[in-house]
Image: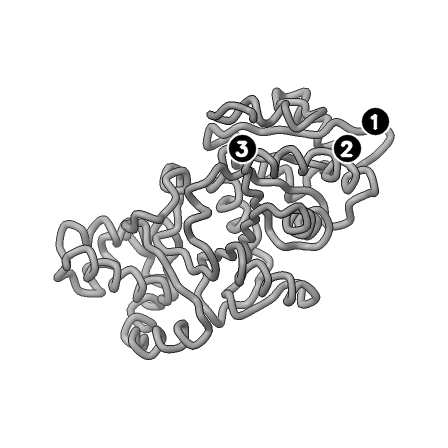
Amino acid sequence: MEKKRIEQHIFHLAHCRGIGPISQVRMVAALVDDQTLTAYQLAQSAHLSTKNKQAFLESYDRIEPERLKKKYAYQNIQWITILDCHYPEYLKQIYNPPALLFYRGDIRLLKDNLLAIVGPRNNTPYGSLALDQLLPELIKNKIVTVSGLAKGIDCAVHKKTILLGGKTIAVIGSGLDYSYPYEHKKLQKEIGDYHLVLSEYPIGVKPLPYHFPMRNRLIAGLSLGTLVVEAQNHSGSLITANLALQEGREVFAVPGPITSPYSQGTNQLIMQGAKCVLTASDILEEFIFDIK
């Protein structure tokens, strides 16, 4: 009962303004010690600034958790908290894990061997061919792919995984009632129906630009390793790779032509110590199981 009550508090906090992942986790830690804390005391425990404290307290009082739960149930959206047994252990280990994850689909996939695969929105035919060469063996060995449902490589990862009969997880930068880009709405529904779609953002939250670097930390944090297929210098894919490195995860990179700007980032990663990937075996041998 105590755990359930704290999880109800976490659901409430997830819809409050003025707090981010770090503040939410601080509040959860305070609630574990004392479930009777007021909203003001929770704000104090998170060391909120005056501006954020005011935004938090105002939104906390307006939220009606039971009404919100009915909205989620109507849209077939569920959630897990950081206290839940299904919450991914690898994600708990990152610097700023979300206190709550919203999802549609098979939450059990989070217990499998997850590999993040990222690349540019405007990928080249070389990037698509690299996926064609690597994915079949990865899927055969029960690797679950994780990507961000964006245009380009992300979308290709999800679609090719599904065509190969594998499982895939999409992590998005908005509430699960949004599809971004809109043309991926059908794909997002298919993944939610038969695979898994995740977000740390509640329904009604739009896909704002600053959400995507936050989403990238989840893609890297969920996974045993991150494969960068193509990347320009200073790209979002490199941000995801660097986040994986910061968390002590494996980083893999596909080498490419020195004449291609889309291989500059991956070639640079390899020079800095990322594992050069020529075959799927280069990835599989780093996972903690035997290649079948």
What residue do we see at 72% from left, 39% from top? 131
> Contact, CB < 8 Å: mark 1 with mark 3?
no
Side of 86 where 255 appears, left or right: right
Tell me which amino acid carries mark 2: Ser
Say which of marks 3 and 2 sits in front: 3
Tell me which amino acid carries mark 1: Ile
Helix, strand or loop at disc 1? loop
- Residue position marked by numbered label 3 in the rendering: 225
For residue 45, above or below residue 217: below
Tell me which amino acid carries mark 3: Gly
What residue do we see at 51% from left, 65% from top? 176
- Label 3 environment density (alpha carbons within 10 Å; few <14, some 14–19, many ≥20): many
The colour scheme used here is one colour
The furthest residue to the front: 292
Q: Which of marks 3 and 1 precedes in the sequence? A: 3
- Residue position marked by numbered label 1 in the rendering: 258
| Nearer to me, 225 or 104 | 104
* Number of the label disc, if any, that sits on residue 244: none
| Nearer to me, 232 or 17 | 232
Helix, strand or loop at disc 3? strand
Side of 210 where 9 appears, left or right: left
> Contact, CB < 8 Å: mark 2 with mark 1?
yes
Q: Which of marks 2 and 3 precedes in the sequence? A: 3
Q: CA distance from mark 2 to mark 1?
A: 7 Å
Percent x, y of residue 250: 53, 28
For residue 247, above or below residue 30: above
- Image quadrant assignment for residue 188: bottom right
